[in-house]
Image (spheres, rainbow, N blue to C red):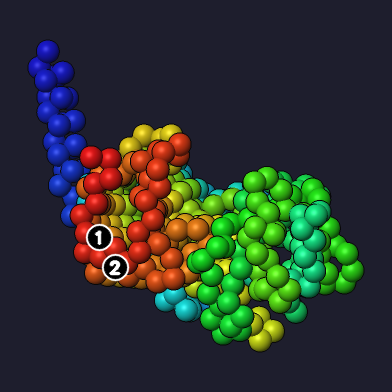
Amino acid sequence: MRVAYLFAIVIFLSCSRDESKESKHIIWNVETKFGVSKENAKPGTDMALAAVAEHFKNNTGDQIVLKYNSGTYLFLGSNPAIDLPGDFDPGPNGRLIIEGEGMRNTIFITSDGSTPDIDGQNVHRLTFRDINFARNYLTVTQGTVVSVNPEAEELILELHSGFPTPEEIWSVPGKRLSQGKYLRKYTDDKSDPKVILENNPQVHYNPEKTYQLDGTMWVFKIDGKWSVARDEYKLGDIIGVKCKHGGNTYQFNGGSDIVFEDCLWTHRSRGVFQNGCTNIRFSRCRIERITTNNGRVPCLATPGGGPQIGQPNHPRIGDVVIEDCNFNSCGDDNIALFNVDGAIIRNTYASNSFAANIKLYRCTDIVIENTEVENGYYIIREDYDGDEYFLYGLQNTIVNPTQ
């Protein structure tokens, strides 16, 4: 009996010493420690993440920085570029920080369009900082209307020089998926095209009946409830072509305390927090169009939206902060909050979205401070089958749309 008692004391003291360990701030340069290569950063990054998970088993209070140098890192292969260990959960003082040397200096290029760039299942206490997440090819296209056929509900676009064909950016080669295929009119401004707001809904085109006519000439078949005549398409209109496709830039299922700081998204920007993921923060982040493509700034920065926090039919999410951000010209909602209880959007600029600059769906306790929406609107929506409230210039407001 005495032996068992002493053994229990030893275990208790051992656990107490572990909990009282002084937290360490550890910086691991991924190139020197794990051999991460800029030509293919995926294998070395997998090794680094495995080492982090192993370290946290006995050192839960440490903060580990995986440091990526300036330069462009290619992540090759069909799996998520950054495939975080499942149920990753350092202690209350612990944290993993994946860090570059500035959003203009450290660039992550992923090659696969069907999986998330970052995938996390029940991940806690994680920060991404000072990184540009990008592609090395254009993910959007556009053109000028050269023919309108109201009887056939068809438009012919001459694609602008240097922009890909629709076939090249559809989600799966050889398959023309119908989801997220829309057109909208833009101003004819080569340096800063703006989506036209009046009489310019998103018009769905049928990819099965969209085809190359000759060279850069493409026929787009309009279907559903839309009409080229009613929506007043005419020769010379500049059209942004939305081909929403591929996986998300990040996807978190469950988890908490996930942060993006000083990050930039180009070419693709949609990311999702779902299944009850909470305590989410974006600080000083940007979504931008590329500077120029053969003399034109693209109409769209990306084919999809920006942060999608929550989902319409998923558990509710709370504790969201979006601050000091600039999200511009996304192919869907620049910012979307679904089933969120408690969020602050402050000191943020959201502009020129293909859909809504800020969408709130079944949200409560949303505080909007010093936030500007330009060339677009907020949508406050209680239900997909209910009313939509289009608000222009909403400022410094506490929003409780479900009350």
Using the rendered image of the protein, determine whether residue 246 is visible from the camera's viewpoint: no
* Dots 1, 2 in contact, CB < 8 A: yes
Q: Residue at x 89, y 69 (%)?
A: 214
Other-residue count near label 2 (Cα within 10 Å), few / some / many at <14 / 14–19 / ≥20: many
Q: Which residue is at the front of the view, 25 or 131? A: 131
Judging by the rendered image, the residue that carries numbered circle 2 is 371
Q: Residue at x 10, y 17 (%)?
A: 2
Indicate the secondary structure of the residue bearing disc 2. Answer: loop
Amino acid tagged 1: Ile
Residue 102 vertical placement versus 389 (above, below): below
C-alpha distance separating marks 1 and 2: 6 Å
The residue lying furthest to the right in this view is 214
Left or right: 231 as drawn, with respect to 270: right
Q: How many marks?
A: 2
Please identify the quadrant where the N terminus is shown: top left
Q: Residue at x 40, y 62 (%)?
A: 377
Indicate the secondary structure of the residue bearing disc 1. Answer: strand
Residue 106 vertical placement versus 40 (above, below): below
Judging by the rendered image, the residue that carries numbered circle 1 is 368
Residue 247 in the image, given as x and y percentages of width and height: 59, 50
Please identify the quadrant where the C terminus is shown: top left
Other-residue count near label 1 (Cα within 10 Å), few / some / many at <14 / 14–19 / ≥20: many
Residue 167 in the image, given as x and y percentages of width and height: 78, 59
Q: Which residue is at the front of the view, 261 or 381? A: 381
Residue 329 in the image, given as x and y percentages of width and height: 50, 68
The residue lying furthest to the top in this view is 1
Using the rendered image of the protein, determine whether residue 105 is visible from the camera's viewpoint: yes
Amino acid tagged 2: Thr
Q: Which residue is at the front of the view, 13 or 4? A: 13
